[in-house]
Every structure is written in C-alpha cells, then in structure tokens.
Amino acid sequence: MHAMNPPDVSPYQRIGGDAAIRKLVDRFYERMDKLPEAYAARKIHPADLTESGNKLFDFLSGWLGGPQRYVEKHGHPMLRRRHFPYAIGPEERDQWLLCMQLALDETVADEPLRTTLFAQFVQLGEHLRNCGANAHACEPEAART
Ligand code: HEM
C-alpha cells in the first residue's frame, strides 16, 4: 500500500468532491465579475453568470474524475468548438487564468494538487485560444465557416 500516494484517489476526491468544486467555481466567477483586470473575459460572458457556473461545475466534476454530469446533460464537451463563438485571444485567456489562479489559491489547500491543476488549465486555456498571437486575425473560426 502507498499510503502517501494512493493510486486510486482521483483529483475529484483529492479536491474534496462536489462541495469543493462548487466553492472553486463560485470564487472563480466572483473574481471574474469583480476584478477590473478580468473585464475583457467578463464582457464576453452573459450578464447572469449562474448558468455559466453550473456548466463549469458540471464539466469540472467529470474532468476531475467524478460524476460525468456535463456529458450526461450536453454530450461530449468539445470545448474548443464550444468556444468558437467567443473571440479568445491572449488577453482573455490570461484573464480567465488569473481568476482561476486566485480561486484555486483561496479554495484548494492541497498545494501540489493546486499546482498540477493550474498547469492543466494553462494548457487548456491555450488550446481554447482562437485568435491573436500567431493567428492572422482576431476572428473566431465559426465566423469564417
Ligand atoms: C481554460 C479552461 C477553460 C475551461 C475549462 C472552460 C470551460 C467552459 C465550459 C465547460 C463552458 C460551457 C460550454 C457550454 O456548454 O456552452 C464554457 C463556456 C464559456 N467559456 Fe470557457 N473555459 C475555459 C476557458 C475559457 C476562456 C480562456 C475564455 C475567455 C474568456 C472562456 C469563455 C467562455 C464563454 C464566454 C463561455 C460561454 C458562457 C455561457 O454560455 O454561459 N472560457 N467554458
């Protein structure tokens, strides 16, 4: 037995299950709503963030190895495609990540878990970026098809 690092413990369990994910999501959208530095990310979201929060909660639950709620309700996440309608450049990506970094710091006490999760969010955020930097124009792909 590896008591220090049990192989069968999912990130969902390590983070603290539903209650911890809900706290993380609430803090995340609170930050996005209030931080002036996150305004570019905030302004492409709906005025009411309730449903955005519910979707992120459902997604993270499955992504962390818990119940696959997002898939059950909406099908495969296809996150990159679902983000095509929004112009996500380096600024929006970084602002999203800033809110997530702050929310993780405030709600996840397990430091190695926090660091691992943030590194994965950084990769995912870059994967979802659909304009700016190396792209020719800040125009979501969906608008071109
Ligand atoms: C980096 C990791 C990210 C994750 C895990 C994530 C996750 C999600 C999920 C699960 C949804 C719901 C999709 C749906 O069913 O419609 C969503 C929607 C959305 N995301 Fe992201 N996202 C990420 C990055 C970003 C970034 C960088 C931006 C730019 C600011 C962004 C902006 C949005 C917007 C505007 C919506 C629509 C909100 C709504 O309809 O309520 N996301 N995201």
Image (cartoon, rainbow, N blue to C red):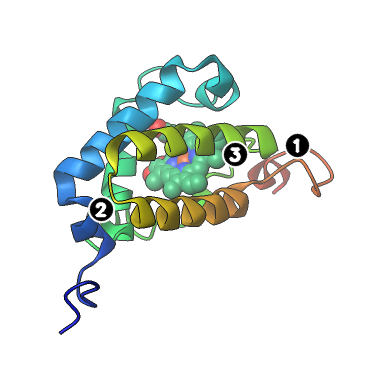
Using a 10 Å C-alpha cutoff, classify the residue at mark 1 as few (fewer than 14 neighbours), some (14 to 19) or many (20 or more): some
Label 2 residue near ligand 1, CB within 8 Å: no
Is residue 106 something that shows in the picture?
yes
| Closer to the camera in the image, 58 or 98 | 98
Residue 137 versus residue 72 in the image, above or below = above
At x 63% / y 38%, what residue is drawn? 88
Locate the N terminus and report the quarter of the image it occupies. bottom left
**Mark 2: amino acid:** Ser
Instruction: Tell me how many marks there are.
Output: 3
Disc 2 to disc 1: CB gap under 8 Å: no
Q: Dot 3 lies on which element?
A: helix
At x 69% / y 49%, what residue is drawn? 145
At x 29% / y 51%, what residue is drawn? 110
Q: Dot 1 lies on which element?
A: loop
User: Alpha carbon of mark 1 to alpha carbon of mark 3: how far?
Assistant: 13 Å
- In the rendered structure, find residue 138 and report the number of the disc placed on it: 1
Q: Position of residue 18 (x, y in %)?
A: 16, 47
Label 3 residue near ligand 1, CB within 8 Å: yes
